[in-house]
Image (tube, grey):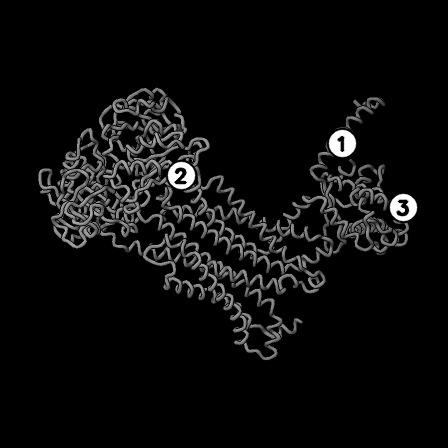
Amino acid sequence: MLILAQLETRPSHGYEIAQSIEARSNGAVAFHVASLYPILYRLERRGLIAGRWVEKSGQRRRRYYSLTPEGRKMLDAQRRTWSAFMQAVQAAAGLDYA
Amino acid sequence: MPDFLAFIRSRLEPLELPRQRELQIVEELAAQLEDAYDALLSRGLSEADAWRELQRGLPDWKTFAAQVLEAEGPIVRAMQPARAPGSLPLRVLRAVKEQHPMQGLAGDLRAAFRLLRKDLGFSATTILTLAVCLGANIATFTVVYSVLLRPLPVPNANRIVALGDVYPTVTPNDIVANTVPAYFDRLEALTAFESQAMFTYWFDTLAIDGKAQELRGMRATPSLFRVLQVQPALGRTFTDAEGEVGSERKIILSHGLWQRLSGGDPAAVGKDVRLGWTGQPYTIVGIMPRGFSFFQMGSDGHARSEGDEIQFWLPLAFTAAQRSDDARTRYGFFHIGRLGPGATIEQVRAQVAALNARMFARFPQFRFTELRMYTAVTPLQEALTGTVRRVLYLLWAGAGFVLLIGALNIANLSLARASVRMRELATRMALGAGRLRIARQLIVEGLLLAGVGGLAGLGAGAALLRGLESGGLPRLPNASSIGIDLPVVGGAIALSLLTGVSIGLVTAAGLRRTHLPHALADGRSLTAGRSAQLFRRALIVTQVAVSVVLLIGAGLLLTSFRNLLSTDVGIDSSRVITATLFPPPSRYNGQPAVAALSDRLLESIRAIPGVQAAGVTSNIALSGHASPSAVSAADRPSSATDALVVPSVVAVSAGYFEAMGMRLVRGRYFAASDTERALPVAVVDDRLASRLWPLEDPIGKGLFRGESVRYTVVGVVRDVAFESPAARAESIGTAYFAHAQAPPMGRLRWIAVKTVGDPLVLVPMLRSALAALDRDLPLSDIQTMSQRTAGSLASQKLAMTLATLFGAVALLLSAVGIYGVLAFVVARRTREIGVRMALGSSARGIFRLVFTEGLVLVAAGLTLGLLGVLGVRRVLEGEVFGVTPTDPAILAAVSVGTAVVALLACMWPAWSASRVDPLIVLKEQ
C-alpha cells in the first residue's frame, strides 16, 4: 500500500519511491534496495503498476512506475481496510482523539 | 564516479531470466545507486565516504537474486528445467509469449499505429487504394444485394414461384402472361403448390381531401394473402366469397393510404370509400401493416420508386366470359404459387408441362404447339429481376476485379516496405521475438490499415451510390430498397478483415526464408531474393491482365450504349411530350367512349399554338412492354400455320404516327374518317408486312384478330421498338388499328404531342385541356419522348457508367503498381547501375535496361488479358449490342491505351535510373 500511495499522484522511479516513503514517514519507514525492487517487480507482474523507460538528456535512462487502474482500485480497497483496522486499534487502545 | 553497471554485474550472479529482462534489472539498480551516490555527494561527503556509505546499504546479493526471481513469477521459473545452455533467453521469452496468445495485442496495435503514422506515404496510398476498391465493391454489392438477393418482405419468400407463358417466337419471358382459364386448370393440377393466386395491377382514383388522386393498386384473388402469408394490421383480408362477381366491392388499404385517408383512425375499417373507376362504394375490410408492399412495379414493368407502391387491394373476381375457353389467349395476369411442404420447383415444372400437353391437345385452334408455347416457372424474385440479373452479377465481378488489382498493389507495397523494415524485423527476431510473434505484428498492422480503409470505403461506397442515382439506379427493380444496411456493412467488414490479414500474411510470407545474419548485415535479403522478385513481377502481369479484361468490358458496354443511343428506334423523339390518362368505365363505358374522349381531347390540344401534331395510342414506343396478341392474315396463300403470328397489337388515333414521326412506307396513315361506322382498317409495320406477305403488296390485304371482323390494311409504317431499343431487332412486328374501330385494348392511353418549340412549355396547357373535358381525370406520367428513350436505357447506362469507372480505376491502380515495382527495382539496383555506368554504360543504355523490364511485364499482362477476354467472350455476348465481344477496334484501343499508360508508368523509374551518379553510388560503398 505504501508504494502504491507514492505513485498515486505521479509516476516515479525506484529511488524516488524509496526517498519519498522515507521522507513522508519521517524516516520511520525505510526501504532497502533489497526489498524495494522485488516488491516493485511483483506489483508490476500483478498488473497494479506499470513501468516504462524514460530517457532524459544527459542522464541514465530510468524506469518510471505509474499506477494502473487496477492499482488504483487496490489502493482504495487497502486504504479502506487499513482505516477500519486503524480505527479498531485506536478504539481498543483507548487512543480516541475525539 | 564508479561504474555502477559493472559493479552490479560483478556482484549479482546471473539471474535465470530472459537476457533482456536481466539487463533491465541491472540497469535499474545501477540508476538507483547512482541517484543515492549523487545524494550523498550533495550532502557534502567526499567521494570515498559516499562510496563507503552507499555500500553499507547494499543488500545481500544472493537473497536479492532469489527475491527478484520469486517476484518475476512462476512461469519463467517453470521453464528452468528445459534450459539448454546458451539458447535459454530466446526460448523462454518465446514460451512466455506463446502461452498468452492475446498478451501484447494492445501493444501491437499501438506499435502499428505509430509505424503507420510515421510512414504516411505508405499508409495514405494503402488506405486510399482500399477506400476506392472497397467503395466500388460496397456500392456494387449494395445494389446486387438490394435488387437481387434481399428476400421479398414476406415470410419464406423463396418458396414463392411465378408462372408465365412464353412464346419464344414473339417475346421473351413475360411474367404477366397468364390467362384465367389456365389459372383454374392449374388450381386443380398443380398439387405441388399449397396455395396459388392471380393478380393484376390496377389504377384507380380516390378523393382524398376532396381532390381526385390517382392511386396504384392491385386486384388479387383472395388467396393472395394466403400465398404471401401476411396478416392485416387491422380488420381482415378478403374471404373466398368476396372473390366472386357481385360481392367484390371490398377494399384493403395500405398503411400509408389509411393514414392519408383517415389519419390512422381504426374506425375506418367498415366504412365505405368511392372509387373513380366504377363510381361505386367499396367497404374497407382491412389495413395492411406498415411497410408491407407487394410488390411495386413501374410503368416499364419493373418495380421501382416509392411512388409506385401499391396502396390498395381489391378482390379479383372473374366473369363467366373470362373463365371461358375463348379466353385462353387473353393474357394480362400475374400468377404466383407457394410451394407446399417438401415440394420442389421441379415438381411444379413437371406438373405444368403435363397440364399444358393436355391443353394443347384439347385446343388445337390456339396453335400452342406451332407457336412453341411453354410455361416458365421461376422463383418470384428471379422473375422480378430477370432483366438486370446478369448485368448486375457482371458488374459485381468487375468490382471484384478492381479489388483484386488494389489488393495486389497493396501486397506489392507491403513487400517493398517489409524489405525496408527488414533490419528492424531481423533485430527483433534476434532479440527473441518469434516469427509467429512478428507475423502477428504484421497482421495487426494490415488489419489496422484495412480497418481505416474499410471505413473510408463505406463512405466512398455511399458517395458512389448517391452519384449513381442520376445514372439509372432508380430505374432498377426494387430501387427504393437500395441502401447500405446491415448485411452490406457486415460484408464490407468481412472484406476489409480479409484484405487486412492478406496484407499481413504476404509480408510475413517473405519472412519465412529470411536468413537472419544476412538481414542483420544489410537488411536486404527479404524481398531481393529471386523468388520474391518473380512474385512481384507476377503480380504486375496479373494486374495488367485484369485491367485489360475490365477495360475491354467497359469499352464494350460503352460502345453498346452508344449504339443503343444512336439506334434508330423508328421514331423522331425530339420535341415530343407524352402523358398517360386512364378513363374509368364509370364515366366512359366501352371502347367507343374512350375513343370519343381521346378525340375531343386531341381536338383541343391541336388548337394550342405551337402544336404540330397530336395523337393517342394504347402502347407507346419504348413503353417497356410489348402488347402481343395473335393475328392471322386473311389473304395469304401459304399454309395456315404461317398465317398466324403474335405481333404487338396497338390501337392508335389519327395523328399519332405524325406526332411520333413514324415514316410512312406505303399507303396512308389513319385519318379522322376511320370511325366506328367506316370500313375497319389496319396499318402494319414493315416487319409484320414482310412476315405475312413477303412478296406481295400488303395494301388491301385482310387481317383478323380473333374475332370475325376483317381489317383491311391501308398503310405500312416503319417498325418501332416497344420494349427497348435493343429489342427492336427481335420483334416480329406490330399491327395498328384505328382506335374507334379497334378490338378492346384496355383503357390506358398515351397522348403524344409534337411541338414547334420546347415541349415542356405545353404541359400546363395540356392539363387544362383535359381538365376542361373532365375535372376528375388526372394526366400522369408526363415525360418527353427523349426522357422515355433515356429511361428505357437506364440499366445499360448504369452498367456502362460503373464499368467505365471500374476500368479507369483498374488502369490507374495498375499504373501505380507498375510504377511502384519498377521504382523499387531501380532503388534496389542503384549499386549495380552505378557500377555499370562506371564501367561505361550510357544513360540511354540504363534507361533501356529498366524500360525493357517494364515493357516485358506490360506485354505479358496484355497478352494474358486478351486471352482472358476470349475466355469470357460468351458471358459478354448477352450484354452487348451492335458490337461483338472481340471487336478488333475495342481490343486495339484498350491494348494501346493500356500500353501507353503502363509505359508512362515505366518512364519515370527508368529515367531516374539513367540519372544515377556512379561517383556517389560508389563512394557510398
* B107 vs B429: above or below: above
Let me know if residue B472 appears in the view: yes
Q: Are marks 1 and 2 on the same chain?
A: no
* B373 vs B694: above or below: above
Under mark 1, the amino acid is Gln
**Residue A65, disc:** none
**Residue B379, disc:** 2
Q: CA distance from mark 1 to mark 2?
A: 70 Å
Left or right relative to B244: residue B43: right
Residue B434 drawn at (x, y percent): 71, 52
**Towards the viewer: B360 or B297:** B360
Of the numbered discs 2 and 3, the one sitting upstream in the chain is 3
- Please tell me which residue is depicted at 40% across the width and 55% down the height of the picture: B874
Q: Is mark 1 in CB contact (under 8 Å) with mark 2?
A: no
> Within the image, what quadrant is residue B157 found in?
top left
| The C terminus of chain B sits in image quarter | bottom right
Q: Nearer the viewer, mark 1 or mark 2?
A: 2
